[in-house]
Amino acid sequence: MIDLFTSPTPNGWKVAMMLEELELKYSVNLINLAAGEQSTADFLTMNPNGRIPVIVDHDENQLTVFDSNAILFYLAEKTGKLLPADGPVRHDVIQWLMFQASGIGPMQGQAVVFERYFDSDEPAARARYHNETRRLYTVLDSRLSNNEWLAGDFSIADISNWSWIRSHRWARVPTQGLFHLERWMEQMRTRPACERGLNIPPSPGRASAVKSLGSAMTTK
């Protein structure tokens, strides 16, 4: 059994999608970010950085893993799925996983902050992060022009990148004209396990059905 500590964010959903794809048994515990539960002493013992998600794998002597992409990597290696054991494709998967961690996540995240949450309007900052996020989308579009998936078969690289790009409208960054990227996005959207993962935990509009920290929301 795996305990997942998470919130309805791109990084949280990517781990839920992974668990659903792998059909692993897990329980979900909602971390209330607005209430600061990620900064409590109990949570910081699991992740000193105070960020979701975190998993505790009771099948592996209560092994704790934090950082969403590290969790994807761990679960892939645990199960032998969605990450080749060796060879060039393995390195391709890792490259595109890191592309999300170093590019898509930080740039799109900042685009959202300046578009949605910053107290004052900062046109230069908005343009900077908007344009860089769009540029990164074009990199993916080019990659996908000759590849069904980002790296060989469907992998953790696809889960990681799509978990962010699917919310491009919230960042006000368009995907129009990026036909290969949009084809891939639709391909991801129609995967049943990914669709399930996007509701674990539910988005803020449906969060009333979710229990809070310390109690299992759902068990699979």
Image: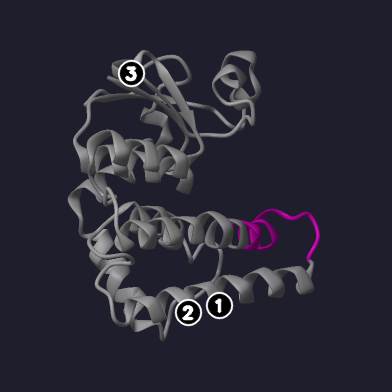
Q: Which residue is mark 2?
A: 138
Q: Earlier in the sequence, mark 1 or mark 3?
A: 3
Identify the amino acid type marked 1: Arg
Image coords of residue 166 (percent x, y)? 40, 61
What whole-number distance in Å separates the C-alpha atoms at marks 3 and 2? 40 Å
Q: Which residues are magenta?
A: 109-121
Query: Which callout, 1 or 3, points to the residue nearer the camera?
Result: 3
Image coords of residue 194 (percent x, y)? 27, 49
**Residue drawn at (45%, 60%) of the image:** 95
Q: Quadrant of residue 19?
A: top left
Against 154, residue 2 (above or below) is above
Cβ atoms under marks 1 and 2 closer than 8 Å: yes
**In terms of depth relative to the viewer, which is nearer, 80 or 41?**
80
- Quarter of the image with the C terminus is top left
**Residue drawn at (26%, 65%) of the image:** 152
Q: Which residue is mark 1?
A: 135
Q: Quadrant of residue 32?
A: top right
Q: Which residue is mark 3?
A: 60
